Image (cartoon, rainbow, N blue to C red):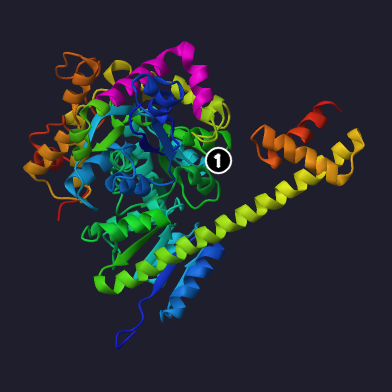
Amino acid sequence: MSTPLHIGFIPLVDAAALIVAVDKGFAADEGLDVTLVREVSWSNVRDKLNIGLFDAAHLLAPVAIASSLGIGHVKVPITAPFNLGLNGNAITVSPALHAAIMAELDGDRFDPMATAKALARVVAARRKSGTEPLTFAMTFPFSTHNYQLRFWMAAGGVDPDEDVRLVVLPPPFMAESLAGGQIDGFCVGAPWNSIAVDRGVGHILHFVSDILVRAAEKVLAVRQIWAEKNADRLAALIRAASRAADFIERTENRTEVARLLAQPERIGVDAEVIQRTLDGRLKISPDGTIRESGRYLLVGREGAGRPDPVQAAWLYAQMARWRQTAVSPEAVKTAMAVFRPDLYDAALGRAGGAGEGATAPFSAFAGPPFDPQDISGYLGAFDIPKRV
Amino acid sequence: MGAESSPKIVIVDESPIRAAILEEGLREAGYTEVVHISEMQSLLARIYALDPDIIVIDLENPSRDSLEQMFQVSRAVRRPVAMFVDQSDAASIQASVDAGVSAYIVDGLKKERMKPILDLCVSRFNAFAKLQDELDRTKNALEERKVIDRAKGILMKLKGLTEEEAYVLMRSTAMREKKKIGEIAQSILTASELLK
């Protein structure tokens, strides 16, 4: 056994590949002695990774990019050689907001353009009657949740910085805040949407796969300098996580996986709720309505584990769109270089090639096709935020 | 504090005892404007209302991510900056993470005024951890005492021993099995439960 590795994670279902790699002994089979450390905030995960208290981490893909560029925080180049999950988030709204959106809906309720336009009408009516703006919660300024929520509402004409309030809440507080009326909706990862539905305080309005077909969500992150010094151990970690991802995707293993993840020192919620999210078969309303999707959360299948630099560029474009940074061609290159399919291919002995295993190309429900070579042009096609 | 006025410090900590220890330390050091927030529900609203120069938060606090958002809100008049943004002092960053505390400085406060405050936070957080540790140990010792007494009672009843003899029996068994006397006592309790 080599020196122990400390890996930080947040209790979410998309930490599954790391948890299973350790708890099923796949990491040990690779000669790795891994201690998983459960954390309470993304800020902690980022800081502890940055200063080397963690060797690796379960990290929001946008945080890996922001850290590498020094946006909003210390500049620490990060390497992301493995996607721990694609998609997996959902937008949940209070029963009152759900009813208001459904009353204004013109079209299919699973069509994000139809719901976003309905939301715009709800927002306009509230403004007219002098009612407080709606408040939506997400998990971190540099999060897919933030960008997915913004992308969705802006497509319908709602300016997320002007027309509603956006706040950050820790995932375990979401359901409670929705019940207490402090927020009207949120975008968060599994299992927290299901928790709100089970408590009867929320309706799942969208799976984020309605918004983006393939969204890089969490990555296995290490410092670039660590990756360079520990190439063999990183490759072993990628193999262990990949084997775990394959294990998780086999339906006959789901009950066992859900039980492992449910342990109090791991995610610590009911195994049944976790299994729903792994199966992509979710209760979306307190009345028991079920919605199934093969794209709810991808852990390993359809080439999900292989990082796609185009995804990194899209996330960077969102930072630029919402004025967290300015567009620069060098920064786009740096952002794309955070995602390392070459390390993934080398560790797993695969030939690689662009988009290997991906059955669906990168696409969103609104806006022009995304071109990482022309981010300014891409962003210019959106009306919101208004350019000043 | 010299000619400059005392900076306004907000402590965000769900542990009232630790916050009190820190607050006292800051006041002793001459910082007069210290406010403790323990209620996380309306954290941001309260911070905006207080408009502090420095925000201190414990790393166990999940609301740290909510604070981070304040950097991004362009409409906020004064934006806080994480102390980690300045990498010139790696040792104090390491010390504060080890102690479990993080701090945010609002634009405009001079960096050299932050250093003594952060050092004080680190030492008070460490002092609290030590206190907590001692408390836990005392509590465990008390618990163990109770378990040993109950096990003694069982041995006295079952084997007709005196209190002294029961204790000696447990101690010699512990020594022979290279275990703690508390563990032997616990296994006596477990066994007697099973054989009831």
Residue B27 screen position, x and y as percent: 46, 78
Q: Main secondary structure of the magenta part?
A: helix
Residue A19 quadrant? top left
Local packing at callout 1 (Cα closer than 10 Å; few below 14, some 14-19, many 20+) is many
Task: Give the SS element for disc 1.
Answer: loop
Residue type, label 1: Val
User: In the image, B134: left or right of A302?
Assistant: right
Residue B130 screen position, x and y as percent: 52, 59
Q: Residue at x 40, y 63 (%)?
A: B122
In-front residue for pair A356/A125: A356
Residue A363 visible in rendering:
yes
Q: Residue at x 76, y 38 (%)?
A: B170
In-front residue for pair A289/A137: A137
Residue A290 visible in rendering:
no
Q: Which residue is mark 1?
A: A201
A286 over A20 or under it: above or below: below
A270 over A375 or under it: above or below: above
In-front residue for pair A188/B3: B3
Residue A273 screen position, x and y as percent: 53, 28
Residue A241 colored in magenta in the image: yes
Residue A314 screen position, x and y as percent: 19, 35
Residue A207 quadrant? top left
Magenta highlight range: A235-261
In-front residue for pair A100/B55: B55
Residue A123 colored in magenta in the image: no
